[in-house]
Amino acid sequence: MGCRVKLSEHAGHFYSYRAPWAGNNLTPDVWRMRFIMETTIDSTTQVRWDLGILYSGIEDPRLDSDLADLAAMAKHFSLAYKGKLSELLGPAIRDYSEIEMLSGKISSYLFLRESTDLSNAAIKAKHAAFQRELSALRGEHLTFFELELVQLSDETLKTHYESEPVVAKHRPWIEHVRVFKRHFLTEPVESALTKRSPFDSSSWGEFFDEVEADLEFNFRGATKNLTEMVHLLTESKDAAERAERCAFQDDAEHGVDRHRGLHRTGTCSGYGRQGADVSAPSTDL
């Protein structure tokens, strides 16, 4: 005998199915997972993060208020605990956790907000400004914390582990930081590197994401981005669609190659894949 089981709720509608697991040696959870894996989403247009639980928008005054609070907390942390970790490790860890949670809240919101619209200059500017401010705060007021933490003796830490629950709770994190003790540099150097972190190699990745987000392809009368085109090539069960998508990619990539003075062999191979040669100069320019 089967029974009706609620699986999910979407847009106010309940989805359920009759699960005849009796006599099949399958639990309700297994049936549920099988149903989920066999159910596909045809469109992502209605899939969105609900970021309203964090901030209402990049102009939300709470965003600037939280940033101001973060700056005040970082400055207080440095004044209260620098040079005093051997006596105040527990309170320092509690305050450091609060700083990390608040900075994580702001960072998560701005990162996810930018991810939904990589071409929005206002969002990118807001995120970049926050990264610069956060890096400056960390470099100026928080760099000392891990440097002093790794210098604490094993005996001092043992005393804190045994007497302060908050320190004992964070012992795995403390031991992980201490693994890199011999790799830490002097505080002035670590501070300078932290302040410059927004301009490190990760900037190239951000630039790549922005360029990729601007790419659009007209395919079968619809505008698609790069991710959608790759999905058609790798996941579509329609052989004709995959072949058309492959030919479309080859035409586009050969055009780019000719523009760059490169020569490609093979079809639908892509850069760096077997069968692709992008090193020889083209002779048909």
Image (cartoon, rainbow, N blue to C red):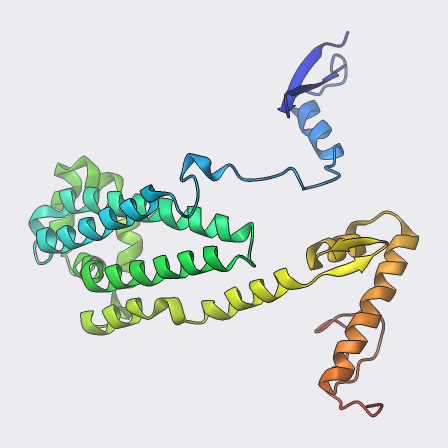
- Residue in the picture at 11% in, 57% down: 82
Asked if 58 appears above or below 3 in the picture, the reply is: below
- Residue in the picture at 72% in, 9% down: 3
Instruction: Give the x, y percent position of residue 96.
Output: 22, 47
Looking at the rendered image, the quarter that the C terminus falls into is bottom right
Looking at the rendered image, the quarter that the N terminus falls into is top right
Q: Which quarter of the figure has residue 20?
A: top right
Instruction: Give the x, y percent position of residue 60.
Output: 38, 43
Instruction: Give the x, y percent position of residue 258.
Output: 78, 83
Left or right: 116 in relation to 187: right
| Front residue of 88 and 43 | 43
- Residue in the picture at 24% in, 50% down: 68
- Residue 275 visible in the displayed image: no
| Front residue of 78 and 273 | 78
- Residue 272 visible in the displayed image: yes
| Front residue of 167 and 225 | 225
